[in-house]
Image (cartoon, helix red, strand yellow):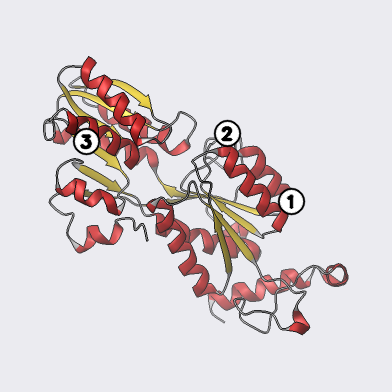
Amino acid sequence: MDNIEWWRHQLCRRKFLAGAAAIASGAGLVSCNRPLAQTPTSQNHNKKRAVIALVLGVQNESFYITMQKGAQQRANELGISLISDAPAQFDPALQTVIVEAMIARRVDAILIAACDKDVMIKPLKHAYDAGIKIISVDTSIGNGDYIHGPVTFPLSYIGSDNVEGGRIAGSALIKAIGGKGKVYVQSVKPTLSTVVQRAQGFRDAIEATEGAVTMVKMDYNDDSSMLATEQTANVLHQVKGLSGIFGVNMPSALGAAQAVKATNQEGVIQVVAIDAPDYAVADIRNGVVDIAIAQLPGEMGRIGVEYAIKALSGQTSSLKKRVVTNYFIIDKNNVDTSEAQAVIYKSK
């Protein structure tokens, strides 16, 4: 019996042990005699197969599109039903509505890239109390430590080591500006776990220069490239001799890069970004963005689905509380290589 069939067997067994009460109430059981992806027959119409929900951070963003594709591919391979949804804006209030809808739909597990590390605790605890398995992908809630931290009910946090990502970005920017100078940070918001951790790692890299590189300011753009452009333009006016900018995500970096471009300082002020959407390739080739540090969102989605199925089949003790995915550094020298092209996020 291979791993997939074993998971199915265990899930069937768990559902079966719910007993006659579940049958009498019309609660669904997974059919043990057919692949999970098949539509039940009319004789079996009350039976329910496992349903996993993937709740993304925002609609129509290539990072999340790539994550959804990775999750869907693995769900198809395992014969599991996956439904995905995302708010129209990167807003925890809108994301909460989606979580509540998933609770009402009685999904078996929720994979979520939480929009806010604090606000999303309450709705996800509500889902957990309703018997739904919770797994974080990309972003976490609380402080992300699901063993010793203030929030421990999620089964796992699957995503990049964002502190390390910030250090990588800092080191790349320090090298690009020749090891000395003034740098500026464009961030999203102070309550989003990933960007807080990236800023921490970036500061660590800057502090390691012992004053050769200094961070003049950090602004928050609420994930708006337009606001990032405006804020960066103000900094360029106020701070003379700026050497580099770190954008904690691609909208932040592209907004900052537009201000750099408007002042004809491409190549003078180096711009480093975390994330590598497909639309950024031309900006890297043209020198608008100097370095992009790609995450692996497809891998996050794939592992998330695998973890959800293991949890539903009773294998929670085998799940790691923290699963770290890797980075890949892209610049104009390697942007057209097969390795770089493989990790660039796809918008379609």
* Residue 31 seen by the camera: yes
Residue type at mark 2 is Asp
Q: Quadrant of the C terminus?
A: bottom left
Residue 215 visible, this orientation: no
Rendered residue at 41%/50% (across/down): 61
Question: Residue drawn at (23%, 57%), measured in percent from left and top?
Answer: 340
The Cα–Cα distance between marks 2 and 1, rounded to whole angstroms, is 20 Å
Image spot of residue 215 (x, y percent): 27, 22
Q: Amino acid at mark 1?
A: Ala
SS under mark 2: loop
- Quarter-wise, where is residue 219 in the image? top left
Neighbourhood count class around disc 1 (C-alpha, 10 Å): few under 14, some 14–19, many 20 upward: some
50 is higher (above) or lower (below) than 326: below
Please say if 91 is above or below 322: above
Q: Position of residue 296 (x, y in %)?
A: 37, 54
The quarter of the displayed image where residue 21 is located: bottom right
Question: Mark 3 highlights which residue?
Answer: 271
Residue farthest toward the top in the current orientation of the protein: 238
Task: Give the residue type at disc 3.
Answer: Val
| Sequence-first tag of 3 and 1 | 1
Q: Which mark is residue 118?
A: 2
Quadrant in which the N terminus appears: bottom right
Percent of width and height locating residue 104:
72, 54
- Asked if labels 1 and 2 touch by Cβ distance under 8 angstroms, the answer is no
Measured from the top left, where is residue 289 in percent x and y? Answer: 21, 41
Mark positioned earlier in the residue sequence (2 or 1): 2
| Alpha carbon distance from label 3 to label 1 | 45 Å
Marking on residue 130 = 1
